[in-house]
Amino acid sequence: MPQSRYRYTLNERVEDPASWFYTWDLADDVTFASACDFCGQGEQRITYGVHRSDDRMQVCARCAGRYPISGAIDGLLLDVRTTRDQIHGLTARLKQQTCQDVIRQVQTVSPDPALEEALVYFDRNLQLSPLRAAIIFLAMPSLPHPVDVRIFEVQTRSNAHQEEFGSLDEAQRRAVWAALSPQQRRRIASLGFAPRDAILRQPRGKRRPGVVPDTISPRMAVLSDAASPQRQPD
Ligand SMILES: [Zn+2]
């Protein structure tokens, strides 16, 4: 079966998605190395535990948004909307908690006092400005465990944030670039601020010869992968 068809094909063990119940246990894989047991998609960050009797699976955000998986609290069946609201709330809290934890871990390996201010900024905005992102991201390789910078959302929409990106040095730009969505990269590149070795995803049919598309998958429309699913980067 072609790969593009397979991506949206349910594992035959699933049968009726509504026969599965959320366990309300969420897993946050900060290396984006998890896979979905429903659709088989890899490179997942947040996955949702579901069960049918003793059978257990981990489900990706796309499947959680696509299929009417059941939810129950204290034995009471929730409607689909309430179930999704519950999942959204748990997702937002977990992503926020993970990002806060990572910044605190970075503080233990780097003495930079700017990290405390970056943590306060994240707590208030649930996103990072380009400079604060650069300070955190450049210290992250010193962590004892690998953490993908894409767990953080970086603000690039306002003129002030774009100018802040433009004021970064080359190493900082490269570090922050890794966390940007394809749309954000195009905007930053159009301002002339892309890092020198940056590779841009070209619109379909307009790919220049010799330019290799990057391998970062597009952000999910549902339950996006960064800290706040309710908000877009500004
Ligand atoms: Zn899936």
Image: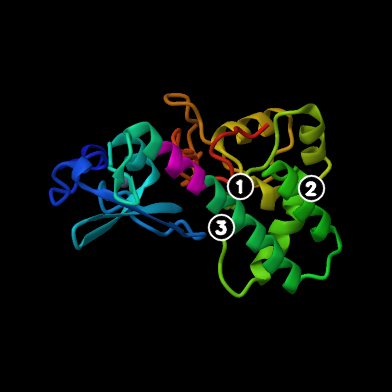
Q: How many marks?
A: 3
The answer to which of 77 and 64 lies nearer the viewer is 77
Disc 1 residue type (three-letter): Ala
Span shown in magenta: 84-91
Q: Please tell me whether the stretch drawn in magenta is mainly helix, strand or loop.
A: helix
Marks 1,2: beta carbons within 8 A: no
Say whether disc 1 or disc 2 marks the residue closer to the N-terminus.
2
The span from disc 3 to disc 1 (Cα, nearest Å) is 8 Å
Report the quarter where the C terminus lies.
Answer: top right
Q: Is residue 39 left or right of residue 233?
A: left
Query: Pointer 2: what residue?
Result: 131
Q: What's the residue at 82%, 70% (across, down)?
A: 111
Query: Pointer 3: what residue?
Result: 148
Where is residue 151 drawn, in percent x and y? 57, 51
The answer to which of 161 and 93 lies nearer the viewer is 93
Q: Is residue 48 left or right of residue 112?
A: left
The span from disc 2 to disc 3 (Cα, nearest Å) is 17 Å
Q: Secondary structure at mark 3?
A: loop
Rendered position, 118 above or below 233: below
* Few, some or many residues within 10 Å of mark 1 (<14, 14–19, 20+): many
Query: Pointer 1: what residue?
Result: 179
